[in-house]
Image (cartoon, rainbow, N blue to C red):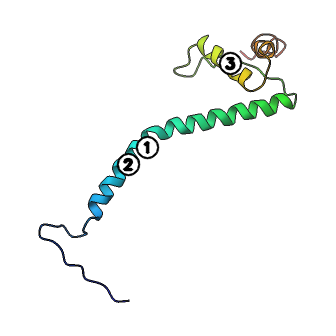
Amino acid sequence: MVARVIPRRRGQRPGGAAPRRLKLYRRIAARYEKHAAHYLAMFTLAAGVALVRLLHEAGVPLLAGTDAGNPFVIPGFSLHTELELLVRAGLLPLAAIQAATVNPAPLPRRD
């Protein structure tokens, strides 16, 4: 293979346009990297809803809770969101409310 020698223009750095192109690629990647977490969260949420739908269709008893020990989880508000997601997964609204009230009642407590 014969290497071609491309003459450089005056003031051009070695490597030609590659550094400018690399800078452009990095700028584009940074723009979309900000949104990557959002797309990942949406994909994870959709996968979770699909999994809950499969569990419900299989007859697995579902429970809802606030997970109050997690950071940025506000008891009450997070439960409302969870009930909404259970309905989105295919449960009837009454079944979603039962998942937070009636279903956990007979379970043994571990304190």
Circle 3 residue? 84
Residue beneath the point at 32% across and 53% down = 24
Occupied quadrant, residue 85: top right
The amino acid beneath tag 2 is Ile
Occupied quadrant, residue 50: top right
The amino acid beneath tag 3 is Glu
Q: Position of residue 103 (x, y in %)?
A: 82, 15
Q: Position of residue 32 (x, y in %)?
A: 43, 43
Circle 1 residue? 32
Between the residue at mark 1 and the residue at mark 3, the CA separation in whole angstroms equals 30 Å
Query: In the displayed structure, does residue 63 sit left or right of residue 16?
Result: right
In the displayed structure, would residue 91 be above or below residue 34?
Answer: above
The amino acid beneath tag 1 is Tyr
Quarter in which the N terminus is drawn? bottom left
Name the secondary structure under disc 1.
Answer: helix
Name the secondary structure under disc 2.
Answer: helix
Return the mark for residue 28.
2
